[in-house]
Image: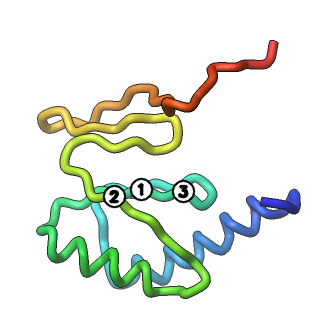
Amino acid sequence: MGSCLGPSYACLFMSYQEHLIFRFYQVDLYGRFIDDNFGAAFIERDEMMRFINYVCNFNPAIQYSYDILEVTMNFLDSSIRIDGDRIATSIYTKLTDSHSYLQ
C-alpha cells in the first residue's frame, strides 16, 4: 500500500463506506480485513445482484471484484463453507504458495 499509513487510511475509508452502504442494506454475515471483504446473505440471487450492483457503483474510486458461491468460499487464508446449519472453516493456501517461512 505504499505509505505506512496506507492500511489505516484504507480501514477508515472502507469503514465509512460500509456505514453508508449498510444504512440501506442488511447482510447476514459480513467481514473485512483492511480492503478485503466477504459477506453472506440468505436472499434470492436477483436481490443479491441488485446489492452487488449498488455496492460496485457506490463509489467510482473503489473497484470491487466478487464471486457468488453456494457452499464454499476462500477468504484470505481461510476456506469457509456451509456445513448443514453451521459455518465451518479450514486453512486455505493458494496453489502458488511456496510454503517458505522465516526461521
List the residue tagged with mark 3: 36
Residues at marks 3 and 2, CA–CA distance in whole angstroms: 13 Å
Name the residue nearer the viewer: 33 or 94: 94
Q: Whole-percent x and y of residue 61?
A: 61, 83
Total numbered labels? 3
Residue 54's label in the rendered image is: none
Residues at marks 2 and 1, CA–CA distance in whole angstroms: 10 Å
Do labels 3 and 1 touch, CB within 8 Å? Answer: yes
List the residue tagged with mark 2: 67
Residue 12 shown left or right of residue 88 in the figure = right
Q: Quadrant of residue 55?
A: bottom left
29 versus 45 height, above or below:
above
Residue 77 shown left or right of residue 90 in the figure = right
Query: Which tag, 2 or 1, sits closer to the chain's start?
Result: 1
Q: Amino acid at mark 2?
A: Asp
Q: Quadrant of residue 34?
A: bottom right
Residue 82 shown left or right of residue 2 in the figure = left
Residues at marks 3 and 1, CA–CA distance in whole angstroms: 7 Å
Query: Which tag, 3 or 2, sits closer to the chain's start?
Result: 3
* Quarter that holds the C terminus: top right
Q: Whole-percent x and y of residue 102?
A: 79, 18
